Amino acid sequence: MTTFWCEQAWIDDRPQAGVRLEVHDGHFRSVLTGVSPRRGDTLLPGLTLPGFANAHSHTFHRALRGLSGTGSSFWAWREHMYRVAGALTPDSLYELARLSYREMLAAGYTTVGEFHYVHAHPDGTPYADRNAMGSALIAAAADAGIRITLLDTLYLSAGFGAPLEPAQARFDDRDVDAWIARVSRMRDTPGCRIGAAAHSIRAVSPAAAGRLAAWCRAEGRPIHVHLSEQPQENEQCVAALGTTPAQALADVGFWGADTTAVHATHLTGDDIALLGAAHATVAVCPSTEADLADGIPALPELQHAGAAIALGSDQNVLSDGLREAQSLETSLRLSRGTRENLAPAELVTALTRSGQHSLGWDDATGLRAGALADFVTLHLTGLRTAGCALTELPRVATADDLTSIHVGGVDRTPDTPGAIAAELDALCRRLRGEDHAPREEDRDD
Ligand SMILES: [Zn+2]
């Protein structure tokens, strides 16, 4: 058994002083508040929080970070993304994911939801092991030390029944039955859970999405979908199906407490009511939505209707869960001219409990006896955090203020962030077809 003593720990939606965590076999055996440290305890000065959940990641997009100027629209950016997707192999995906996941761990994410749709060779020919790419992601997570939910993604159409474009050939599963046959060969492990996603209403028909959701529900697996990220998707959906994406999915029984809508940026009042009544989760990805100029979802209305809010890093333009959470509130303040839309405790819930739930890790949802021993600690005396009220810390701290990260009670704090950065730099440039040497435009002459 390992024991930790926290100066402060986030329990029952607030900081509590003097908390002793007893960890056995990767779980909390007991969590005691208002106690003093004992000999042998690992001391954790600062504020300890449950581990963060990254509810929506496409890890290979990490190779595109810093290329925000490559297109003036979402659709131009997508063309660039397809070029990187075309260059991936199981080996290079493993390498990129392992490094990206270590970066995520350093940012306090102890679970990642990988929305994974690159399944086959670039020409669409399946790998001998049809799950080679998904297995590469699972292995990368295990080697990095982060928990993963592989949201294996069904992707069948370029848009409302149109055949896939050549750049999308490696996403193809032909139909839902082929997807079920392939995914049924994968198994949960202590660090990995298999979930599912319908890519979007553009890429999956309502009938196929409904069948996928029914299979997931019978199997007890979470299911996600990209929803209404861009107005263009809504317009095309109304033209093709006569209704909004949220309603089209509701009509086939898609929504429930086990489903997550990613983005949900452009919803009607009726769409919000549908998601709320189903107690679905909405995974907001603030840094990506800002980068792609998507817009700001109606978070207070969604929450009021009954939906839960989670957070994702999506295209991984940023790996910092705290900054993502802070963006939820700051974007609402700027767009609505009102303060106190989401309280600090609600930001922490989005980053922890709601995100873990959306990924099927309800056993990793807090500092409590019996839960998985995933926790992160922020120091209180850094330049950013010095003098802060404890309850306001989630509004102020960033990933740079994390002093330790534990997954299953094991210390996963990166000790060589510089080495991770150097490897990531070389790999991203290689995947983009660049030399390792400085680029012409970077030179000082
Ligand atoms: Zn996405």
Image (cartoon, grey):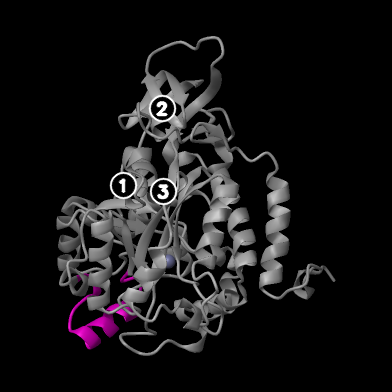
Judged left or right of residue 429, residue 26 is: left
Closer to us: mark 3 or mark 2? 2
Mark 3 C-beta to ligand 1 under 8 Å = no
In the picture shown, does residue 54 fall above or below 92?
above
Q: Which residues are magenta?
A: 227-246
311 vs 110, left or right, is: left
Mark linked to residue 255: none
In the shown orientation, is residue 69 left or right of residue 260? right
Residue receiving disc 3: 325
Upstream in the sequence, badge 3 or badge 2?
Answer: 2
Question: Please, what is the three-letter code of the amino acid marked with disc 2?
Answer: Phe
Kind of residue at disc 1: Arg
Residue lying furthest right in this view?
445
Asked if 209 appears above or below 106 in the picture, the reply is below
Tell me which label, 1 or 3, sits earlier in the chain.
3
Residue topped by disc 1 = 339
Residue 196 covered by magenta stretch: no
Measured in 3D between alpha carbons, the distance from the residue under mark 2 to the one under mark 1, in whole angstroms, is 37 Å
Q: Position of residue 379 (x, y in %)?
A: 54, 30
